[in-house]
Image (spheres, rainbow, N blue to C red):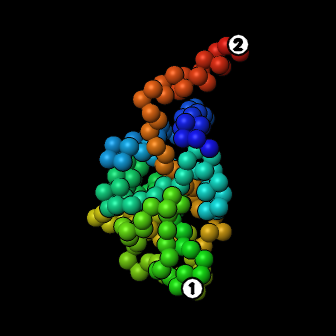
């Protein structure tokens, strides 16, 4: 698929996302040029992954600054119990080895809550979510079993190109034409 087609799909997805959402408008973090939003809809990690993939991807938090931005923007309570785009590769030594992001970005920043990841009670917890009391660097992470139903997920997507303004208006124009 060409970059152009993917960008058009992302732009149109963002338009649909924003117009269908009952929550606040997605928020831009200018440092990486990506938008973020929190979706409150109880689901498993696989369900969250599929839902986020229809637009772009589950959020990948690759720095303390990004983690603090999300915490300050959406607040720690809102983020609590929401899936992120981190997962542990099958067959990895438990519990702390083999973590990766859905985008393939390096998993260098470790925002784990103290004592995490831990495979609590011997359960194979191989998915990432926000959980635990806030730290100085933001809302900490928890390893969680992917089949657990959590409160929702955090989605991340790139900023449309500047000449995408017409594409953003296209669904509105088409809806107006159908009246």
Q: Residue at x 45, y 26 (%)?
A: 163
Q: Position of residue 99 (x, y in %)?
A: 49, 72
Q: Can the viewer see residue 99 in this picture?
A: yes
Mark 1 vs 2, N-terminal side: 1
Q: Residue at x 39, y 53 (%)?
A: 70
Residue 84 bears which disc, if any? none
Extreme-front residue of the structure: 2
Q: Position of residue 108 (x, y in %)?
A: 37, 68
User: How dense is the environment of label 1, judged by Cα within 10 Å: few (below 14), some, or many (20 and up)?
Assistant: few
Task: Name the image quarter holding the N terminus.
Answer: top right
User: How dense is the environment of label 2, judged by Cα within 10 Å: few (below 14), some, or many (20 and up)?
Assistant: few
Q: Nearer the viewer, residue 76 or 97?
A: 97
Q: Nearer the viewer, residue 64 or 8?
A: 8
Residue 5 horizontal side relative to residue 134, left or right: right
Residue 170 horizontal side relative to residue 95, left or right: right
Secondary structure under the numbered disc 1 in the rendered image: helix
Residue 179 bears which disc, if any? 2
Discs 1, 2 touching: Cβ within 8 Å: no
């Amino acid at each position: 698929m060409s970059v152009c087609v993917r960008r058009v799909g992302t732009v149109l997805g963002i338009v649909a996302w924003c117009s269908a959402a009952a929550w606040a408008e997605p928020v831009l973090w200018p440092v990486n040029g990506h938008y973020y939003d929190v979706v409150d809809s109880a689901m498993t990690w696989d369900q969250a992954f599929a839902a986020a993939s229809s637009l772009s991807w589950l959020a990948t938090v690759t720095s303390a600054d990004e983690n603090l931005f999300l915490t300050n923007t959406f607040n720690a309570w809102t983020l609590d119990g929401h899936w992120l785009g981190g997962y542990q590769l099958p067959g990895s030594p438990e519990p702390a080895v083999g973590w990766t992001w859905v985008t393939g970005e390096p998993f260098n920043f470790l925002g784990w809550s103290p004592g995490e990841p831990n495979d609590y009670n011997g359960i194979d917890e191989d998915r990432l979510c926000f959980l635990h009391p806030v730290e100085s660097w933001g809302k900490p992470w928890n390893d969680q079993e992917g089949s657990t139903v959590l409160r929702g997920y955090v989605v991340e997507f790139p900023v449309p190109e500047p000449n995408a303004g017409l594409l953003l208006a296209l669904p509105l124009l088409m809806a107006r034409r159908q009246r």
